[in-house]
Amino acid sequence: MSGPSIQFHKIWIEQCRATEDIRERFGLEDAIRYLIGEKLLDFVRASEDDPDFAKELPAFVAEIRRLFSAAEIREFLDDLERTKCLVPPEPDLEVEVLDDEMDEESWPGNPVLGAEELLRFSRIRHLLKP
């Protein structure tokens, strides 16, 4: 006899509940970074390959809009775009790195990964538009 199946595509419900606690204990910045910057990004990645996740995406986005104002979301995404998402890290000029030593998982070394991340970010921004 098997127990109840875990529906991973519905994990966003618990993540949203946790976000309310994070906001109360640690503030808006930590809460929005957790839910949009980590969990929604992971969820969008999963939705690209799994139809169960893709079906849940609109409900997850609706709950994010309930938890955060349009201004809070816009400010977070603008900051993310300026500081992390679209600007590759500055090379350390004191450390010589050969091209073949560059980490394949970092997007400056792998333009395909960079393009995928930019497309996901654009998709998230579009999904969260008021």
Image: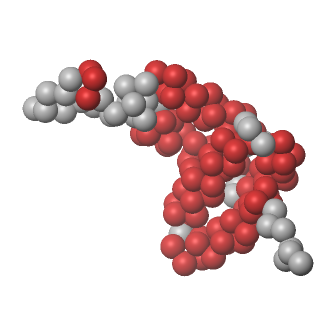
Residue 19 in which image quadrant = bottom right
Q: Residue furthest left?
A: 94
Residue drawn where x is 70% and y is 44% of the image: 46
Residue drawn where x is 86% and y is 75% of the image: 2
124 relative position to 111: left or right: right
Q: Give the position of the N terminus as an image quadrant.
A: bottom right
Residue 94 in which image quadrant = top left
Vertical order, 42 against 1 (above or below): above
The x and y percentages for residue 65 are 76, 53
Residue drawn where x is 58% and y is 42% of the image: 77
The x and y percentages for residue 54 are 81, 43
Residue 87 visible? The answer is no
* Residue nearest the viewer, comparing 66 with 105: 105
Vertical order, 130 against 14 (above or below): above
* Residue nearest the viewer, comparing 119 with 107: 107
Residue 61 visible? The answer is yes
Residue drawn where x is 56% and y is 32% of the image: 117
The x and y percentages for residue 18 are 66, 72
The x and y percentages for residue 51 are 84, 42
